[in-house]
Amino acid sequence: MLPVRPMSEIRENATIDAWVQAFARSGRQVNAPHESDAEIIELPGDDERCLAATIDTVAEEVASGLYRDHFTTGWVSVMASLSDLAAVGADPLGVVLSVSLPDNADEASLDRLRSGVESACRSLDVNVLGGDLNPSAPLSVTVCALGTVPRHDHLSRLGAVPGDGVFLTGGAGSGNALGLARAAGLDDVCFPEAGYRPTGRLAAGRALRGIASCAMDTSDGVLATLDQLSRLGGVGFELDVAPEDIVEERVAALCASLDVPVWMMLAGPHGEFELVFTVSESRASRAVEALREVGLAPLRLGRVRSETGIALAADSGKRVELDMAAVRNLPLTGRSLASYAEELRALGKGWGLE
């Protein structure tokens, strides 16, 4: 029997818990901390719907040079929050912005930022409802997304049981591939930033209501998502699909050209906005058909098991047990993308992954 993996083993979880404990809890809040991608709040006088609310900031990606085009900053800022709504199966109401701008920001860059925000909203039929502008350096963009969910039929990160299938709504790895290309200095040739336009899966989340047993988005990477679901639910995951078959084809091609193990594109912290979801075997075909109706071809990754943790399919044909705490606790700030990639690769070698 593999050991239980506590939530507090992950530094980010422990930090969140310290903040949560400092605040009084609303009696209308349905979800407990960490249990869902968006906060679910009962609405006074409404027995049918709850409010879904979430907020996210893009700042470090700009400061580190990962995002150089402000269109990307605007696009991802919106999609990050809408993806959280997708993971609870919400119907969006709109978004509110808070933008902190350097005094010397040029108008062309601001046009790109505004265009990225509006293009992301338009692609998912969502509107900017309002917001706030502040002078500050460096640039940061915060988006609060609001939606509603059926009171008793929203998705959460809890509910997976052994024997369930685990699925992914689309190819993964593009976010970490952008970081890899940046680290190699080949981003303009191998993986241009303009090709990184991840989309929140709002239609998929709604389609999975009442079908999936749990769901979470992959904004922190596929393996971190599975690890969080494992810690929350006290279950684990056995992946039957090789990393090469989980990532987008262009991501696998980039890894081959740079001689980088593909599993790293699933383990890095800069993800995309697909949904990982679990579903009972009796409902699996229904889930697949529901997603096909909204234009998606979900990939079955494997199954839920009773032992916690993640077993990754390796080149040898065996499964490798991953220590995701070691990955998720790697320091990110104040270091280069290349040094992070080197340390991540070293961890994999220690597990027998090449």
Image (cartoon, grey):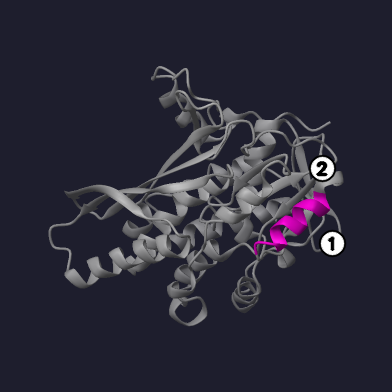
Q: Which structural element holds mark 2?
A: loop
Q: Are marks 1 and 2 in contact (CB under 8 Å)?
A: no
- Residue on which the image places disc 1: 316
Q: Amino acid at mark 1?
A: Ser
Residue 7 to residue 109: above or below: above
Q: Quadrant of the C terminus?
A: bottom right
Image mark for residue 301: none
- The overriding secondary structure of the stretch rendered in magenta is helix
* 118 within the magenta span: no
> Magenta part of the protein: which range?
284-294
Residue 35 to residue 108: above or below: above
88 or 75: nearer the viewer: 88
Q: Which structural element holds mark 1?
A: loop
306 or 179: nearer the viewer: 306
Query: Quadrant location of residue 280?
Result: top right
66 or 95: nearer the viewer: 95
Residue under the image location 42 percent in, 59 percent down: 76
| Image location (x, y in percent) of residue 279 | 77, 44
Image mark for residue 280: 2
99 or 317: nearer the viewer: 99
Categorize mark 1 by other alpha carbons within 10 Å: few (<14), some (14-19), many (20+): few
Residue under the image location 18 percent in, 69 percent down: 107
Q: Is tag 1's residue or tag 2's residue first in the polypeptide sequence?
A: 2
